[in-house]
Amino acid sequence: RAPWPTPYARMAFGALAKELVSIQSVGGTGALRLGFELLKASGAKRVLVPTPTWPNHPAIIRASGLEQIDVEFFDVAKQVIDLDALLAGFAKLQPGDAVLLQGCCHNPLGADFSLPQWKALTEAIVAHKIVAYLDVAYVGFGDGIDEDVAGARHVLAHAPEVIVSTSGAKSFGIYRERVGGLYVKAPEASRAAVRSNLY
């Protein structure tokens, strides 16, 4: 029997937490590495990355043996997210590949997706049969816990396969402790295999 979801998972993902396989990690960066290794083991070949992104993302993707596909997603002149450009990049992926999306307060631009944008991204993820990889490192730093994870919750509620890396070190103010976690949503029949790969 799977263990009850962690307090962090219950706080961030609510009732959805019961559907997630989870493992503690060395910070959010450790969670990212575990998640990309899981993607590689599952047969994924490519990861779509909205750029600019943080320097650790390309290094971890490369170390995991995955191909990174960059898509510029920000209109500098207008200072807004170019959602159409990002969604157009999904055509470069095959079913089973992944897209890396950052949660609130995270990407170097400080440009967060709105809930309608999260909904459009979720529809595209489902339509293209790709894995959503959510890097959610700053829950509680934006507009409040529920508001900060609204997009992630929407993706988790509607996409069949989702990976979420989190940083409790940041959210709980214990950065020197390097506390993180990886959460995986997969079909029920696949959860035992996911768990065995993570543990």
Image (cartoon, rainbow, N blue to C red):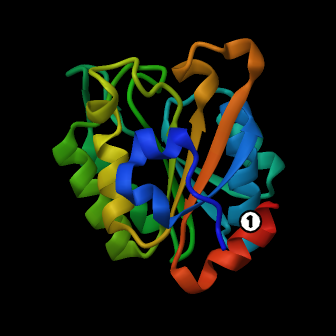
- Residue at image position (65%, 42%) is 181
Q: Is residue 168 left or right of residue 197?
A: left
Q: Specify the quadrant of the image occupied by residue 167.
A: top right
Q: Specify the quadrant of the image occupied by residue 76.
A: top left
- Residue at image position (26%, 65%) is 123
Q: Position of residue 98 (x, y in %)?
A: 54, 61
Residue closer to the observer: 72 or 15: 15
Q: Position of residue 87 (x, y in %)?
A: 32, 55
Q: SS of the residue at dot 1?
A: helix
Residue of label 1: 40
Determine the residue located farthest toward the bottom in the rendered image.
189
Q: Amino acid at mark 1?
A: Lys
If the image is split into quadrants, where does the N terminus sit?
bottom right
The answer to whether residue 194 of the structure is visible from this angle is yes
If the image is split into quadrants, where does the C terminus sit?
bottom right
Q: Position of residue 118 (x, y in %)?
A: 27, 48
Mark 1 residue crowding within 10 angstroms, few (<14) / some (14–19) / many (20+): some
The answer to whether residue 86 of the structure is visible from this angle is no
Q: How many marks?
A: 1
- Residue at image position (58%, 57%) is 4
The image shows residue 12, relative to residue 19, as above or below, that is: above
The image shows residue 107, relative to residue 95, as above or below, that is: above
- Residue at image position (40%, 48%) is 13
Determine the residue located farthest toward the left in the rendered image.
116
